[in-house]
Image (tube, coloured by chain):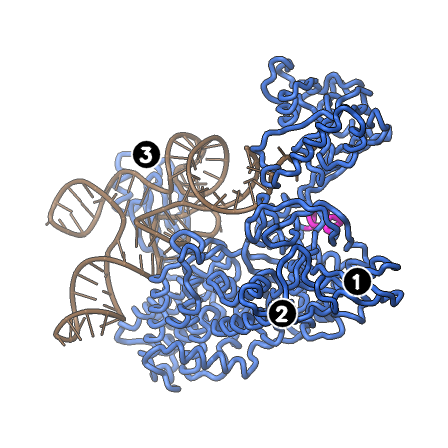
Amino acid sequence: MKRLKERYCFDEIEKKWQDKWATEGLYRVKEDLDKEKYYCLEMFPYPSGNLHMGHVRNYSIGDVVARFKTMNGFNVLHPMGWDAFGLPAENAAIKNKIPPAEWTLSNIDNMRSQLQSMGISYDWEREVATCLPDYYKWTQWLFLQLYHNGLAYKKKSHVNWCPSCATVLANEQVVEGGCERCGTAVDKKALEQWFFKITDYAQELLDSLQDIPGWPEKVKIMQKNWIGRSEGAEIVFTAQKTQEKMPVFTTRPDTVYGVTYMVLAPEHPMVEELIAGTEYENAVWEFIKKVQQMSDIDRTSTETEKEGIFTGAYVINPLNQEKVPIWVANYVLYEYGTGAVMGVPAHDERDFAFAKKYDLPIHIVIQPENEELKVEKMTDAYTEEGLMINSGPFDGISNKEGIRKVADYLAEIGSGGPRITYRLRDWLISRQRYWGAPIPIVYCEKCGVVPVPEEELPIRLPLDVEFQPTGESPLNHIPDFLHTTCPRCGGAARRETDTMDTFVCSSWYFLRYTDPKNDKEAFGKGSVNYWMNVDQYIGGVEHAILHLMYARFFMKALSDFGLVDKREPFQNLLTQGMVLKDGTKMSKSKGNVVSPEEIIKKYGADTARLFILFAAPPERDLEWSDQGVEGCYRFLNRVWRLVYSYGEELKNPGQEGKETLAGEDKELRRLVHTTIKRVTDDIEQRFNFNTAISAIMELVNGLYHYREKEEQNISLVKEAVETLIVLLAPFAPHFAEELWEVTDHQGSVHCLSWPQYDEEALVADEVEIVLQINGKVRDRVKVPANLSRQELEKVALSLEKAQAAVAGKKIKKVISVPDKLVNIVV
RNA sequence: GCCCGAGUGGCGGAAUUGGCAGACGCACAGGACUUAAAAUCCUGCGAGACUUAAAUCUCGUGCCGGUUCGACCCCGGCCUCGGGCACCA
């Protein structure tokens, strides 16, 4: 036995093994076609400088999975890196006068060493940082691929502007009308910006949610709602004055005969022509101005009163040639559908309220079957099903059928037809910031927009920069960067100075990990197709829409470009819950932050990991408890003492047959094997690490009891202790490794095969069954295992309690479940 | 408003297929060891009734009802909390 110390000195042990694992390259992996691969990935962090408990949880979960899969014979890819571009670096630079690159890189160094102190099985040789040129070169290259395939385009549009961050935001980054980062109310600005055409993939992003059964239903529902597919029809009205077509989108074409007005969004370009030179012109302009001054929060709130104004113009309904007035109103969104809406007050809540307010006519065109609607009596819109009336040739058919028939008819007469609309908008990727990947585009006076040739990549970020957020990219003020020559004609040209949204960088990092050092390609096809998909992805649910949807989009696009074979990046997704303290999220402002560094210093990484895995199942929120940590620390010490107390004995266990075991010996062996089964199932099938750990604790308790015995089967104890150490390995890797070594074993515990349980050892000779009378537990009795129903009933009926219960009564029914219970109904 | 989740002892949680509710841990209490304390080891620990005690009984998984021999689990209706979306035509 190698120096087995009496006390568990975690600090010594953890340092020792971390160094050893690193020197030996224990966690380095390469492609190996003889082994089945497994790609285990945790969301890479933003290098804020310090690890927080959320990271500890995320990476502890991932490490259990990675180690478990390795021990089960898989070739496991388990990489880590840094989502290293982004605003905080610029803010820190302004505040502390440190260049963003320097600040970020030193944060990375600090966080890397914190991560390494956790002893996670990363292949550090595959580390990537999105802010380094050898990475963002390929982000730029991928931008060009999207550009050449028509998926990256520039357009002027009303975009979300965060005045505090001084940059634009993607639609997804606006939360309740505020900036997702800082909460500031966003404004609308008309700017020329770059977009990725994610809407081209709207339908596939929706459909292929079915191809990822390993994702939580909740996340898929969130994505589904975000994509917001809506089936309906386009109906083309015609402006009476200009004869211009005015299409609307509606999900209720069956109510088209009930249209009594038309509403345009204030931004709708047709408004100007309609009111030009009329008596309504000034009033309408004033109204539009007023609406546009409202913040997005106010404007999109359901609380906000619906307001509108008549334009003085009319449109013709293509189905009944009726002339209806055109209004402009604050509740119509220019970005959705066609920016114009038909008003059917009788059958739409919102239209009803609007019509009542402005005294617009209400025409009933859907009649419920068992009552008769009367306009005068209506207090609400009727939005349920019914039969179509006042609808010309469609009278008498059900409105459900009408939806289809009217749409088809519209197509026939050339005034629209069936349409599908999505809520999803294209992804705005331009950011007016310095610390991001430059967009590889050049503007030439002669040639216009010119993509940078691939050989010229990367377009490097200049590193010596003085800047303040001004609302335009700081790169605008760096002449060396700004001025260039046109790659096409050689003339003077100007670089694009906006940088890319950091979500672009994180939309493909999992591909780079498969081939991180490649300086010829973003990733080699062989590597990427060997490792992809990610088998298990683990991270916070806050990325349910943004990151996870963008990454899916990238994968599909890259697959269409022939760069990858798969169309979904993440086969299985685990969304872990938050780490709470005193019932709320840890935050500096609440002063309830527990620092991982301090916990690791005080108890060691193994205890920290064990606690965070034990305190709750991974998907649920976890309440931090200092006493709970203490408990896990005690448990490891308890294991240590157990092994120590057997000491030399385990070296010479003697040979005792396992076939002849009886009594407590047999029970101990059964405990060992049921524990293997429980731990294996809990990790593999349910990711319930909390119950896996409690099973291990029960094994330890069992061993303590067995130790009280006078006569012990030491070979059995050896099996139990070895199993215990191996089962602990994924949870407390340093601890297990040390005990493995000091119990006289060669090689790393982490390279062992995961223990298999012996089915036969699981079988108990005796089982306790329950006697119920009328479904209530009345007694418990031990019987031999595997008794038949009849035998079980016989035993049960012979029991005193049963006799007493049936005395003088008729037995109505006896239900017996072998090895479980007998229920006597009287 | 709509769409998801969740609700179990003093606390975190367990009960995997409808079959012993409360595994495991924390906290607490008692005992052993110790001059003493800490640490450790052992025992107890949902509420209530009765009892010297053992035992026994009743109630108990947010609330109300249902299905079933049997419900934390399935069904219907509510309440509370958390999350997502929110004038999407």
In the rendered image, residues at marks 1 and 2 fall on the same chain: yes
* Part of the protein shown in magenta: A198-208
Give the structural element (helix, strand or loop) at label 1. strand
Q: Specify whether residue A401 is in view.
A: no
A577 to A465, vertically: above or below: above
Q: Is residue A690 left or right of residue A258?
A: left
A543 to A286, vertically: above or below: below
Give the structural element (helix, strand or loop) at label 2. strand
Q: From mark 1 to mark 3, how far is it between C-alphas?
A: 97 Å
Of the pair A325 and A735, the residue shown nearer to us: A325
Mark closer to the chain start, 1 or 3: 1
Three-letter residue code for mark 2: Ala
Q: Specify whether residue A597 is in view.
A: yes
Residue at the spot of label 2: A129
A727 to B52, vertically: above or below: below
Q: Chain B's shade in the image?
A: brown
Q: From mark 2 to mark 3, how far is it between C-alphas?
A: 78 Å
Mark closer to the chain start, 1 or 2: 2
Q: Residues within 10 Å of mark 1 (few under 14, many from 20)?
A: some
Q: Is residue A750 left or right of residue A454?
A: left
Task: Name the mark nearer the viewer: 1 or 2.
Answer: 1
In the rendered image, residues at marks 2 and 3 fall on the same chain: yes
Task: Name the mark nearer the viewer: 1 or 3.
Answer: 1
Residue at the spot of label 1: A494
**Who's blue, chain-wise?**
A
